[in-house]
Amino acid sequence: MKNTALILLFVFCSLFGYVNADEKALVISHKDPSLQWGPCPDFIPAGCAIAVLQGDPAKNNVDIYFKVPGDFHIPHHLHTSQERMVLVSGTLDVQYDNHETATIMAGEYAYGPAKLPHSAYCHKGDDCVLYIGFVEPLDAMPVKSTEAE
């Protein structure tokens, strides 16, 4: 009986484990000239850009590059979704409410909880390009800051 259950589990996993087999694998550099950079939400100053890497921004599970120039302040805001991030270039300070400022260096991973307000600053020098994976649809909503930024 135990062996039959294990065999059925293996068959089930084999049949349904490849649901996404029709999707294409991707490798995309932040320097790729074919990337289609679009504007950021209106509350973020000019100079900010977003490129969708995979998925539909209106649906769950979307991956983007978020880019701002050096010496750039990203206003206080929040997202419905948690953020899984890797800084691709530049140096970025991130300040989440009720947390110490974290400095993210190129190549480092960061995690941002859903609905936790934050602001950021890209250091002078290289553009900050941040890979962000959103679980929920892509959004960003401004939040009135209770502290001076």
Image (cartoon, rainbow, N blue to C red):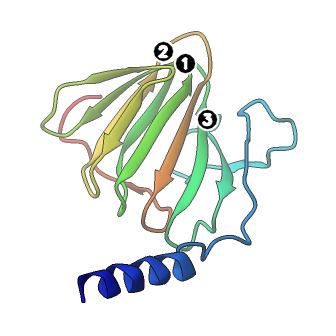
The residues tagged by marks 1 and 2 sit, at their Cα atoms, a distance apart of: 7 Å
Secondary-structure class at tag 2: loop
Give me the disc on residue 123. 2
Q: Position of residue 33 (x, y in %)?
A: 86, 36
Of the image marks 1 and 2, the number of the one nearer the N terminus: 1
Give me the disc on residue 67. 3
Residue at 15% x, 33% y is: 99
Residue at 50% x, 23% y is: 107
Q: Is residue 113 above or below residue 96?
A: below
Q: Position of residue 111 (x, y in %)?
A: 33, 41
Give me the disc on residue 90. 1
Of the image marks 2 and 3, the number of the one nearer the N terminus: 3
Q: Position of residue 105 (x, y in %)?
A: 44, 18
Q: Is residue 70 above or below residue 85?
A: above
Of the image marks 3 and 1, the number of the one nearer the N terminus: 3
Circles 1 and 2, Cβ within 8 Å, touching? The answer is: yes
Residue at 28% x, 24% y is: 102
Question: Which quarter of the figure is the C terminus placed in?
Answer: top left
Question: Which quarter of the figure is the N terminus placed in?
Answer: bottom left
Secondary-structure class at tag 1: loop
Mark 1 crowdedness (10 Å alpha carbons): few <14, some 14-19, many ≥20: many
Could you tell me the amino acid type at mark 1? Gly
Of 85 and 118, the residue lying toward us = 85
Could you tell me the amino acid type at mark 2? His
Describe residue 35's horizontal placement relative to residue 112 as left or right.
right
Circles 2 and 3, Cβ within 8 Å, touching? The answer is: no
Describe residue 129's horizontal placement relative to residue 112 as left or right.
right
Mark 2 crowdedness (10 Å alpha carbons): few <14, some 14-19, many ≥20: some
